[in-house]
Image: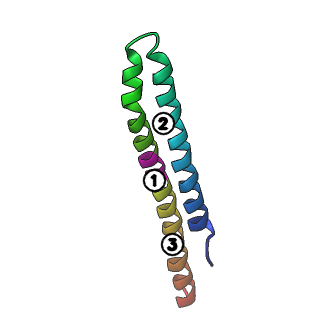
Amino acid sequence: KSFITPGIVRFLYILAIAGSAIAGLIVFASGIAMMNYSAGGLLLILLSPVVFIVGVIYSRVFLELTLILFRIEEHLSDISSKKTAEGG
């Protein structure tokens, strides 16, 4: 019995990196556009890499937790099958 989850998780992680990059670029572009009106745009420009890094870290942690839950299920099913094989 094998799960397809690890392959999907790799694909989702690539999508998360791309999404974080797009979000960072949007924040950067908003900062540039806002600099015409106020100095708050500089803050957005400086926060754009933070948006990218936090997005990547958050998605990585979430996807790792998902994999851990599937591994726990695999180990529990192994334990259950060993118990039934022993007659318990």
Image quarter of residue 87: bottom right
Residue sitting at 43 percent across and 36 percent down? 51
In the rendered image, which residue does mark 3 sit on?
A: 76
Q: Residue at x 46, y 56 (%)?
A: 65
Residue 15: where, in percent of width, then height?
58, 51
**What type is the residue that disc 1 sits on?**
Arg
Which sits in the foreground, 69 or 11?
A: 11
* Residue positioned most to the bottom: 86
For the residues carrying marks 1 and 2, which lies nearer the camera in this image?
Answer: 2
Residue for point 40% across, 28% down = 45
- Label the magenta part by its dominant secondary structure: helix
Residue 46, numbered circle: none
Amino acid residing under circle 3: Leu
Give above or below for 7 relative to 44.
below
Point out the stretch of residues depicted in magenta.
56-62
Q: Position of residue 61 (x, y in %)?
A: 43, 52
* Residue at the spot 50% in from the left edge and 62% down from the top edge: 67
Asked whether the residues under the numbered discs 3 and 1 touch, taking CB atoms below 8 Å apart as contact, a structural biologist would say no
Q: Position of residue 73 (x, y in %)?
A: 53, 68
Q: Is residue 58 magenta?
A: yes
Q: Which residue is disc 1 drawn over?
A: 60
Label 1: element kind: helix
| Side (left or right) of 4 relative to 35 | right
| The disc label shown at residue 24, or none | 2
Decide which of 5, 23 is in the foreground and name it: 23
Extreme residue in the front direction:
36
Give the crowd class for mark 2: few <14, some 14-19, many >=20 residues within 10 Å.
many
Disc 1 to disc 2, C-alpha distance: 17 Å
Task: Categorize mark 3 by other alpha carbons within 10 Å: few (<14), some (14-19), many (20+).
Answer: few
The amino acid sitting under disc 2 is: Gly
Residue 6 inside the magenta-drawn segment: no
